[in-house]
Image (spheres, helix red, strand yellow):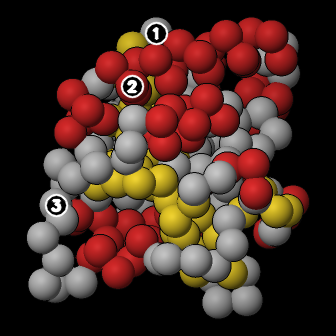
Amino acid sequence: MGKQETRLRALTIRNGLEQEYRSECSRRIVERILRSEWFQKAEIVLSYASFRSEVETDGLNQEVLRQGKQLYLPKTYAETGQMCFFHVEDPGALQKGYQGIYEPEETVQAERMFSDDSTYNKDDVMMIMPGVAFDGRGNRMGYGGGYYDRYLARYGEKIMCVLAAFEEQEMTEIPVEKWDVRPARIVTQNGVR
């Protein structure tokens, strides 16, 4: 299967999961992330505002703030093909942006932390990202815009990257390109890879 067929198949499966089941699986995924050593070490969390049938992150984002960690959420700039993460203190203040996804205001950018003289490293900064599918080799497939791949090509060496996904999103094999970035971990309701 090509990328488009794989993406469509995976989205059909994910969209077909019952809402109650998705919510329960999301809760289990979030629990696994919160209990992880890498989350405990992180001072800064680049997360996302869940959209449609993605793993739900509302509870996770609230817990990041409750624990006193810094929370950053993405804003997409379709005209330039870029994505930036902005500091968020109130996830309830997000507004609809690109494709109807809830996005933060343009406040303090996370990218300032990744300058050459920055003291932050992979233990300090973790990213939790959505995806359409993944495979047993650790490959991730997004929605096809390449926003996360471009972002991680620039800043990935300073970020511990985690894919939050439902077990049902696993495909036998995902077609990959040389620029596709693999997450360091994949967390599903059944475990961590």
Q: Percent x, y for residue 79? A: 73, 89
Mark drawn on residue 153: none
- Within 10 Å of disc 2 (Cα), the crowding (few <14, some 14-19, many 20+) is some
**Residue at which label 3 appears:** 121
Q: Percent x, y for residue 182? A: 35, 50
Q: Nearer the viewer, residue 63 or 114?
A: 63
165 to 47, vertically: above or below: above
Q: Percent x, y for residue 10? A: 70, 34
Going from N to C along the chain, the mark reached first, 2 or 3, is 2
**Disc 1 vs disc 3: Cβ atoms closer than 8 Å?**
no
Q: Nearer the viewer, mark 1 or mark 3?
A: 3
Residue that appears at 17% across and 77% down:
118
What separation in Å lies between label 1 and label 3 (alpha carbons)?
A: 29 Å
Q: Secondary structure at mark 3?
A: loop
Q: Quadrant of residue 138?
A: top left
Going from N to C along the chain, the mark reached first, 1 or 3, is 3
**Residue at which label 2 appears:** 34
Q: Amino acid at mark 1?
A: Asn
Q: Nearer the viewer, residue 104 or 12?
A: 104
What separation in Å lies between label 2 and label 3 (alpha carbons)?
A: 19 Å
Q: Amino acid at mark 2?
A: Leu
